Amino acid sequence: MSPSAPPPSAHNASGENADGSNGIGTRPTLERLVVADAAAWRAWLDIHEDTSDGVYLVLAKKGTTTPTTLTYAEALDEALCSGWIDGRRNRIDDETFQQHFTPRRKTSMWSQRNVGIVEALISERRMRPRGRREIDRAQADGRWERAYAGPATAEIPTDLSDALDAAPAAAQRFAALSRADRYAAIHQVVTAPSAQTRATRVARLIAGWHAEPPAS
């Protein structure tokens, strides 16, 4: 991956950032949690959603019934209902994997995919108070409207496109990036918490690409 376009710190299966950090650059030690099914995960969240730093939740691959039947989609639904979000995924064995789940941070950006899931959960009357508060907060501060697309549908934002048009050498380097590297760069721009930070990120990306030697 190009050094001037690093990926998000923890890009998850649903397209959002959830690095599990405590805000001072360190990660809490999280337990590996095994629950029987979606109902048990929901019950666990009802008790711990306001007090836990997060968990590594054991999830089932297709056809698995032991030690859990809980699938990723089911786990994500319940997490969003409680104002939590998923993070990194790691394989455990042929039947299971673990998914990092943490409470959503106050500045965490929303993906368009999760906005769509949440809207369906609201229509099904499944949202719980903590999850509803996270939605209200995002709608109030503009993060809801700025929800970003995933890799399959992401488009180059106008400010980055304009900057590339003004810097042909950087545009050439950008065009040569892999799909993953290109999305990582777009993700940096569209998830900026402020206009100033966004402009700084665009300028840094352009400068980095401009300084790179041409591909051989």
Image (spheres, grey):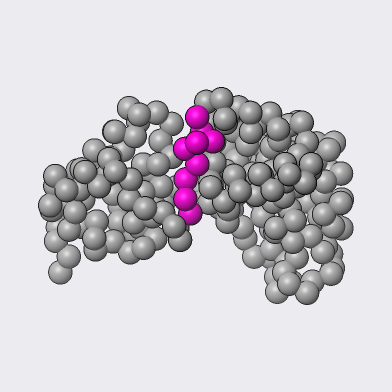
The verdict on residue 145 being magenta is yes
Quadrant where the C terminus is found in the figure: bottom left
Q: Is residue 164 left or right of residue 49?
A: left
Quarter occupied by residue 38: bottom right
Nearer to me, 119 or 178: 119
| Residue name at image x 78 percent, y 51 percent | 33
| Residue name at image x 53 percent, y 31 percent | 107
| Residue name at image x 27 percent, y 40 percent | 159
Q: Percent from the top left, x then y, of residue 205? A: 26, 44
Quadrant where the N terminus is found in the figure: bottom left
Q: Is residue 56 left or right of residue 16?
A: right
Against 53, is 148 above or below?
A: below
Quarter occupied by residue 46: top right
Q: Percent from the top left, x then y, of residue 95? A: 74, 71
What's the magenta bit mostly, secondary-structure-wise? Answer: loop
| Residue name at image x 70 percent, y 74 percent | 94
Q: Percent from the top left, x then y, of residue 193? A: 43, 31
Magenta span: 142-150
Observer able to see residue 123? yes
Q: Is residue 60 left or right of residue 165?
A: right
Against 199, is 162 above or below?
A: below
Q: Is residue 108 left or right of residue 56?
A: left
Observer able to see residue 9? no
The verdict on residue 29 being magenta is no
